Image: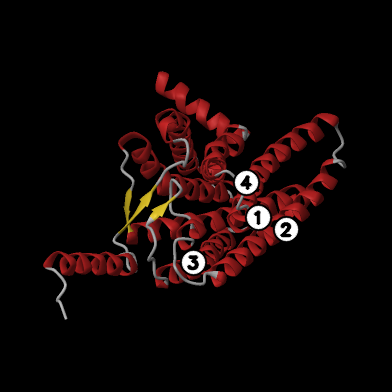
Amino acid sequence: MKKPSFCLRVGHLLLFSMADSNTTDFTNPSVFILQGIPGLETAHVWISIPFCIMYIIATLGNFTILYIVKTEPRLHEPMYYFLCMLAITDLILCTSIVPKTLSIFWFSSQEINFSACLTQLYFVHCFLVTESGIFVAMAFDRYVAICDPLRHSTILTNPVVAKIGLAVVLRGGILVLPYLLLTRMWPYCTTNIIPNTHCEHMAVVKLACADIRINRYYGLFVVFSVIGLDVFFIALSYAQILRAIFRLPTKDARLKTFGTCGSHLCVMLAFYISALFSSLIYHFGNNVAPHFHVLLSNVYLLVPPTLNPIIYGVRTKQIRDSLLRLFTHKET
């Protein structure tokens, strides 16, 4: 029997090596490739402009809130403590995604270490759940302040506020921990290209060559339990607040309180609606354009942190007055 030629044997060896690498190289991938916004790669530089502007506004605005509350003793109240928690959460959310996103847009730096990707995934989802919990705490604070003002200081004491803050953070950390554990255990044997600007749970596990139904079911459970319960409690609080508003004696007082609560609700709705749609598209929206989905997933991560310092900070009289005093004092 004639032996195969040397070239055929070498070719067979190369094909075997390539097939073997295709099934093993991504089992524990050293890096993922973040594609950015699929289909809009040529516009990345232009898209980076609003991203950069929003990040600057969010960073400066939230740091300003933290500085003013820290330096103004009269703002050491539950409402402003919750506002500080929201500012810290927004800063962590923005910083978790925007620097890497801008490096993709500006320098085509698309690689992200596997461990760094999982860390980003955990921080993004953990602090999204935390932000939702802080919205509930702030709605409860406004409910007590407007509907039962005489008991506000006795119900929301500093220890109670600290416990609420700790509970909100622990809830986020515990609920999102299975995301991290499940994502890490799957083999990745087809591709390591993530069609997104950052590592999201479903965007990553969709690359796994395994049955990821448990990820899908648990992801839907988190979305509906967090958004469903939190929106219910927020709606309940604001329904009671609206009843109290219509009982106010003067029209000006009603309009002022209604305007404040209305702006708060608009920010919350932008956060919850965009988060819900983004999550549902990952599970059911196979026909949705990828660039639309990626832009939507960035909206609920960037727009609320940008608007929160304006809506909750600048439109709050005490913070606005403190900010004006800060600038006038510097000028003199």
Sequence-wise first label, 2 or 4:
2
Say which label, 4 or 3, has the lower sequence index: 3
The mark found on residue 136 in the picture is 1
The residue furthest left is 6
Residue at image mark 4 = 274
**Quarter of the rendering occupied by the C terminus:** top left
Q: Where is residue 16 in the image (x, y as percent from the top left)?
A: 25, 69
Vertical order, 279 against 94 (above or below): below
Tell which of 152 and 184 is nearer to you.
184
Query: CA–CA distance between discs 1 and 4?
Result: 18 Å
Secondary structure type for disc 3: helix
- What's the mark number on residue 179? 3
Alpha-carbon span between mark 2 and mark 3: 25 Å
- CA neighbours of label 1 inside 10 A, class few (<14), some (14 to 19), many (20+): many
Q: Is tag 2's residue or tag 3's residue first in the polypeptide sequence?
A: 3
Residue kind at label 2, given as amino acid type: Phe
Specify the amino acid type for callout 4.
Ser
Q: Report how far apart the C-alphas of labels 2 and 4 lie in the structure.
A: 19 Å
Determine which residue is flagged by label 2: 233
Pair 1/4: label in front: 4
- Dot 1 or dot 4: first in sequence order is 1
Label 4 secondary element: helix
Marks 3/1: CA–CA distance? 23 Å
Crowding around mark 2 (Cα neighbors within 10 Å: few <14, some 14 to 19, many 20+) is some
Residue positioned 33% across, 61% down in the render: 115
Quadrant holding the N terminus: bottom left
